[in-house]
Amino acid sequence: MSDHIATDLLPSATPVRYLAEDGTTVDGPAGYPRPSTEELREAHRRMVVGRRFDAQATALTKQGRLAVYPSSHGQEACQIAAAMVLREDDWLFPTYRDTMAMVTRGLDPVEALGLLRGDAHCGYDPNATRTAPQCTPLSTQTLHATGLAYALRRKGTDSAVLALIGDGATSEGDFHEALNFAAVFEAPVVFLVQNNGFAISVPLEKQTKAPSLAYKGVGYGVRSEQVDGNDPVAMLAVLHKAFEHARAGAPFLVEAHTYRIEAHTNADDATRYRNSDEVDRWLDADPLARLEKHLRTLGALTDEDVAAAQADGERLAADLRSRMNADPHLDPMTLFDHVYARPTTQLVEQRDLLATELKAQEG
Amino acid sequence: MAATTMAQALNRALRDSMTADERVLVFGEDVGQLGGVFRITDGLTRDFGEDRCFDTPLAEAGIVGFALGMAMGGFKPVVEMQFDAFAYPAFEQITSHVAKMRNRTRGHLTVPMVIRVPYAGGIGGVEHHCDSSEAYYVHTPGLKVVTPATVNDAYTLLREAIDDPDPVIFMEPKKLYWSKEDIELRHIDEPLGHAAVRRHGKDATLIAYGPSVPVALQAAEAAAEEGVDLEVIDLRSLVPFDDDTVMRSVRRTGRCVVVQEASGFAGFGAEIVARIQERCFHSLAAPVIRVAGFDIPYPPPMLEHSHLPSVDRVLDAVDRLQFTDEPDHRYLTGAHS
């Protein structure tokens, strides 16, 4: 028998929230460390920059400079909090919609966009950045995150791992196996589900009958919480607690209730499955505006601060724009690299074939 | 010298690899206290401790995905899929992640792990316990696929697979687990990818791997009594594939039969035949023939003997190799109906 008591694992009955949509504070649950004003100021700056990055990436798809871009507009509180709670030695396992979190973490934006630009499957060094390749299959990386977390604990470190997934991915079997393995092996891993309401076009009510996606942890003995994903204060508070818990050797599941303001990707047409009234309602719950109002009320944010953050965003966008406007230099002969540690004789033959073709094209 | 079974040789390989490298971990379903349903991991938990050999929850995708994460963290996992068909839940993890991680990260993340898969039939197993699933894996770039047919190969190929920097699907022919040889197990330190000539002959080449190697050898002995001298090649490694050994033999004999237990249609044998005709066409005196399992779901155990390639079926194929310069009428009749 487990020594857990189920009630210790259960999420709050309603999402944890410390800021109302108008930026005023509300009484949230005790037991979560409240972020400092300085941390919130930093979160604000990063959200401004993150939103600008996201808009620039979307613009790059229209110019044909990105193959595809899944926007995280509306999910900035989740993205920024996810990056901010990580220590340098922790690992991040992102999906295709988490480029903003990766850039916030400090990855070079051009390298971070390698997958979506289409010049590489992964444009950065995962070991150097402690960031796994962006995962496009759903929830498969939660198992890798769990295995790596267990490996880190076995090596005697107190590093932890954050696995990001969306609401649709909680229906995939690998997510459930990962929760189970994480609990059984006491892996220091936090699973953050960004429930943005849609799995491409399928709304949450067709995805699950669970009262909250956070309840999916309880059956596996994983402590779970649900949080207002558009409240940056609550996101930071709950994720800090989740990491404290994970570093002590117990996984943690967080469901963040948020909303995908844009379509699934630039190639999607969201008007086919949802109406603009719903989007407008969620625009009123904007995480950035909420934090800005809160900090101004505290007297902790000035017009100059906002302008400085926007200038940071513009600098990043301009740099990204100019670097992405240069065509990447790609060598077809690298197709045969890194299939195996050493190419097989068959691959050597095929490489020679391609070399001959390329030479003929040159001639 | 005491006779050693293939199961014991595999156990010894795991022990010796775990002793040689503390990063090597063994885990899977029932591999701990029980020692695995085939006892391949017998005594490892007792002798190396539960940190080195342990049971996992019963979820194959979980085992493989978790192992991949551990490999990212610097360990060398050796995981057991209990039976061939029970590995299918792990298919996405194997093909989309284990196989591709080195390539998609341009060499930054590597997955030096071994996935042991007891496979194939001939043991009277019920449904879902006798699949020959090698074709799924050999078709996936990034995986190496290895299968022993002898007791010493079980030892040496598993040691090599564990030492290998790439992920290896290590396919163990169940029906040979209890085969015995009076030998001293020895580790030959060579990279994977070498076939072995098990019997030298001049009239035709039999190509086989895993459970079909003993069948081919028996067929060769029977053919010798009829005055036909057959060469037998044991592939040992399906990926990387040893074109050199195969083509040298077929160019010399001019005739070839490929034997596999798996269903023939689009199976690994088809790849071998294609490669031979591309490379040895002018040396061939007859079409290369496949002897394979029928294109049916694996049958109930009381009927499996009719399905599995037998010595007689191999000998019939050898008879069709046009030693008398007669065309193979089997494929001529009805061709234009």
Image (cartoon, rainbow, N blue to C red):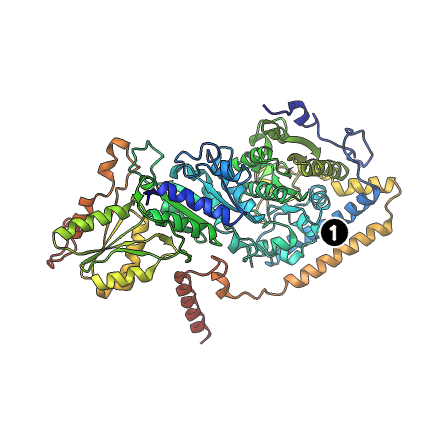
Which residue is located at x 33 percent, y 60 percent? B243
Residue beneath the point at 76% across and 43% down = A288
Where does the image place residue B20, in percent across and percent down from the top left? Answer: 50, 50
Relative image position of residue B206 (x, y in whole percent): 24, 53
The image quadrant that residue A209 belongs to is: top right
Q: Which residue ends up furthest to the bottom in the rendered image?
A: A363
Q: Nearer the viewer, residue A49 or A346?
A: A346
Q: Chain of mark 1?
A: A
Drawn side of residue A25 relative to residue B284, left or right: right
Residue A279 image point, x, y percent: 67, 38
Element type at mark 1: helix
Q: Amino acid at mark 1?
A: Val
Residue A205 in which image quadrant: top right
Say above or below: A308 vs A293: below
For this orientation, the residue located farthest to the front is: B1
Of all residues, the one furthest to the right in this rendering is A299
Side of A163 where A332 appears, left or right: left
Q: Which residue is mark 1?
A: A49
Q: Is residue B315 above or below residue A231?
A: below
Q: Nearer the viewer, residue B249 or B332?
A: B249
Q: How many marks?
A: 1
| Residue A94 visible here | yes
- Quadrant (top left, top right, bottom left, bottom right) of the N terminus of chain B: top left
Residue B96 placement, left or right of A8: left
